Image (cartoon, helix red, strand yellow):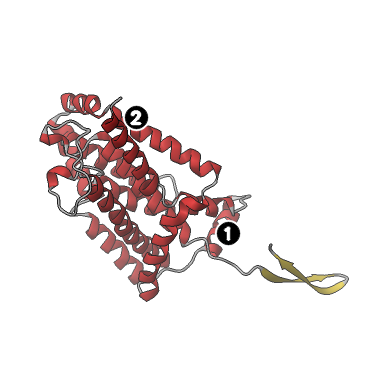
Amino acid sequence: MSKSFFLKTSILCFLIISFTFPGVASADEFGSSMTVTTPKVREEQAASNEAPVEFNKDYFKGYGTDFKSMVTSPARWDTADWITATLVTGAAVGLYENDSKIMKWVQDHKTTTTNNIGDVITDFGHGKFTPVILGGMYLYGHVADDGKMRKTVLLSVESFVLTGVFVQTIKYTTHRHRPYTGDPPHTFDGPSLHGTSSNSSLPSGHASSAFAVAAVIASEYDNIIVPPLAYGIAAITALNRVSHNAHWPSDAFLAAAIGYFTGKAIVASHRNVKKSDLSFTPIISDGGMGMTLTYRF
């Protein structure tokens, strides 16, 4: 193994750890803090923990707060978080090592029909229809006074924006050559403030954006229809970029992970509303009345 190859692989692993899992700890902290007994109890607890989200100055301040929380989250990771990071990193590196073989197989088996279907789905996942859909959802939420719908749209937009920050940082750090250039998958120009479309392959902006929005929508509307539909559109969007020879498989996978974890972290941050450590609970019984004082250490 050459020194240059080892260095590039090490940099890739570092980038995956740094940008793909900024929200793992936040999402895990939220999930572990809830005790669920029945679907009704789960719904009531989630609703009581949700912070209202409206289009105001606090919403925009939340961008900075959420970004800081995600960037610093590795310092709060537990064993489960590190296992997740290791598994996803291993999968990304495995794809990276086999990008050429996988890409050749995809190009040999793609058809005009699959590309056309992928193009249509991509328009919904990341394209001309996405702003229209989100805009329509927000308008409905405003007219019908549906706070959950408005919240879903606003968090989707935040997830889209912050995911874009992570993605563009990696693009300008690596400047990986796209597969259509004919260059090997291990071709990187390195950090630079300048670049072209041909050397901005890692990661896929289309895939990351699609998963960033899908993760929020699927989390807010967790039923048998919405999550499969949202993630299905996002997955086809990612695969379509590989089929069009615009991104390597590892580009699409890393992008999907970035979008997914960012979206999940943003949703969790707006549900994890801190409650007072000191609480009073009135007690009424046949024996009389009283008060219980509880302090959470």
Task: Say which residue appears at 15% left-offset and 53% top-offset.
Answer: 194
User: In the orientation shown, which residue stands out farthest toward the right?
Assistant: 287
In this rendering, which labeled residue sits more in front, label 2 or label 1? Answer: 2
* Mark seen at residue 45: 1
* Mark seen at residue 80: none
Residue 154 in the image, given as x and y percentages of width and height: 35, 64
141 lies above or below 249: below
Residue 197 in the image, given as x and y percentages of width and height: 13, 47
Specify whether residue 183 is in view: yes
- Amino acid type, mark 2: Gly
Q: Secondary structure at mark 2?
A: helix
Task: Kindly indicate whether the residue at mark 1 contacts the one at mark 2 (C-beta within 8 angstroms).
Answer: no
For this view, does 128 lie left or right of residue 285?
A: left
Residue 279 in the image, given as x and y percentages of width and height: 69, 70
Q: Observer-nearest residue: 78 or 118? A: 78
Q: Residues within 10 Å of mark 2 (few under 14, many from 20)?
A: few
Label 2: which residue? 94
Q: Observer-nearest residue: 38 or 80? A: 80
Measured in 3D between alpha carbons, the distance from the residue under mark 2 to the one under mark 1, in whole angstroms, is 40 Å
Image quarter (top left, top right, bottom left or bottom right) of the C terminus? bottom right
Task: Say which residue appears at 36% left-offset and 49% top-offset.
Answer: 19
Q: Quadrant of residue 41?
A: bottom right
For this view, does 225 lie left or right of residue 268?
A: left
Q: Secondary structure at mark 1?
A: helix
Q: Quadrant of residue 67?
A: bottom left
Which is more N-terminal, label 1 or label 2? 1
Task: Say which residue appears at 61% left-offset and 51% top-offset.
Answer: 36
- Amino acid type, mark 1: Gln
Residue 148 in the image, given as x and y percentages of width and height: 42, 63
Q: Observer-nearest residue: 103 or 38? A: 103
